[in-house]
Structures are given as structure tokens and as C-alpha cells.
Image: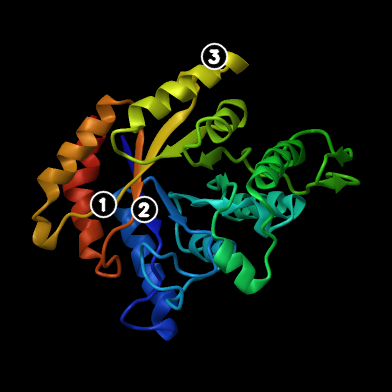
Amino acid sequence: MKIGLHVADFTYPSGPAGLADDLTRVVVAAEEAGFARVSVMDHVWQIGVLGPPEHDMLEAYTTLGYLAARTERVELLAWVTAVTYREPGMLAKLVSTLDVLSKGRAWLGIGAAWNGDEAAGLGLPFPGTAERFERLEETLRICLQMWGDDDGPFEGTHYRLGRTLNAPQPIRRPPILIGGGGERKTLRLVAQYAQACNLFPGPELERKLDVLRGHCADVGRDYDDIEKTVMLPLDVGEGGSTVDDLLTQLEALGKQGVQEAHGWVPRVWETDRLTLLGKEIIPAAASF
């Protein structure tokens, strides 16, 4: 099992003036600790489970470009891109650019979007659920076309591109992670288009994986080709007081087939927590 870091909180004691330096310390410490990936949220306001909307939030792809310049090995992605916040041709270009400038470390993390309040607040597109899923599938098709050999037009229901030229091409075709556990639509899209899914630990996880297995069978996809990831807090407690509990949870997830545990670290600006994860959690999880 691999361990990934989700940087979801940008309200640090040093404030906005120190944020660039704080993020550099965090991502360098994560890379040195052995984290496989670093992600940021694609939100423009902080989400309720982490703080009030007035807390600091950075734009995802600007931040990822900054992090690319300060790291060498960790893979980078938005966890996950809100499909309606950017036109798909531009999104494919953004991820391509991130991949080239990071020397082949970019993923496309993407989902159907859910935060209607922030979208309304900043005037971002946010159609109904059915349309967002239609746009998600068209966006996936556009990205794959732009990352391939076909630079011809794209004609869809919601998007029309006259020429899908994309130069330079990514160093590698960015793997796709689709976030969400919707059994009828989201997991079907995972089976059709993605290299990874993202789910949450809990009593429903096994059923979600079984549903994904069924969708893979329906579309002729090898279930084992899809990386199974979960999002959870990576909390080692004060002085490592909960290391054993976290290891027990990760081992159980590994037995269910989870291949990456990706999550946020409380008070991540205190990078000794990342160092402790690198010493106690990451090497042990590699055997799960």
C-alpha cells in the first residue's frame, strides 16, 4: 500500500504571507518521508468538514505548478477537479502543462463537482446533477483525445472543439482518478475511463468494490487494472499516540484490496508529523 498526502487546509499560523514557504516545507518533508503523491482540493472556498468558507483556499492548478517546482518525485494531482469549473480543452492543457513541467508526475483527478454554494458565490457553472455527469464523460473523452494522436474536432452534446491540438504532449499520458462512490454513474465511468477510483473507508467499501467489479465485467475491463484508493485522515496523534491504531486500520484496508491510502494530516505545517508517518507508517504500509 502507498500513502499519499492531501493538503486540504491552507490556514496556517504564519498567515498568507508565510504560506508559500510553509507549503514548500510541507511538500519537501512529504517527499523526504516517502509519500507517493501530493494532492490539493479543487475548491475556491474551504469546505465545511474542515473549516468555515472564509478560511484560506488556494486555486488548485496554480498551487500544483508551484509544488512541481519544489519537488522531484511525488506525483501531483487535484483531488478532485470539479468538472464544470474549467472548459475541458483548457483542463487537458493544464494537466499536460503540469506533466511536462513536473517531468511526468501529473495525474488527472476529476469528479462531477458538488459544492453549489461556492460555484454560485463566484459565478462558476454548476448545472444539475445529470448534466454534470454528462459533462464529466465528455471531458474524459476530450482529455483522452487530446492526449492521443487524434487532433481532429470533437462533437459532443455539451462541448464542441474545432481542433484538439495539444503541443507539447504530456511526458506520459496522465493517469485518471475519478472521485466518488456513486454506484450507477461514477463507478461505471471508473470502469470505462480511469486508472484509479477513490472511495471512503467504512462498511460500504466492500459493496462499492463489488459494484466496480461488476461494471468492469460489463465493459470488458480488468478489475485489477484499476488502483483502489481511499481518502481518510492520517492522524498519528500527539507524539505518535495513535500510530498503532492507524496501522491497524490501514492493514484492514489492504486486506480489502486498497492500494493507496490518501489523506490529510492534522496540523500539517508541523512537519514532524510527516516525518513520523515516514518512519512508522509508510514502510509498514508497503507490506499491506
Q: Is residue 258 visible?
A: no
Q: Residue 284, how many percent across, how many down?
A: 19, 37
Q: Quadrant of the N terminus?
A: top left
Q: Nearer the viewer, mark 2 or mark 3?
A: 3
Q: Which residue is mark 3?
A: 217
Say which quarter of the image contains residue 238: bottom left
Horizontally, residue 277 falls left or right of residue 169, namely left
Between 178 and 165, the one nearer to me in the picture: 178
Identify which residue is drawn at 46% across, 23% down: 211
- Classify mark 2: helix, strand or loop: strand
Q: Which residue is mark 1?
A: 234
Q: Which residue is mark 2?
A: 5
Height in image: 22 above or below 190?
below
Q: Amino acid at mark 2?
A: Leu
Height in image: 15 above or below 95?
below
Q: Amino acid at mark 3?
A: Ala
Whole-Å distance between the Cαs marked 2 and 1?
A: 8 Å
CB-based contact (under 8 Å), mark 2 and mark 1: yes
Q: Residue 231, how many percent across, how many down?
A: 36, 46
Identify which residue is drawn at 53% across, 60% down: 64
- Classify mark 1: helix, strand or loop: loop
Say which quarter of the image contains residue 118: bottom right
Whole-Å distance between the Cαs marked 3 and 1?
A: 33 Å
Q: Is residue 282 visible?
A: yes
CB-based contact (under 8 Å), mark 3 and mark 1: no
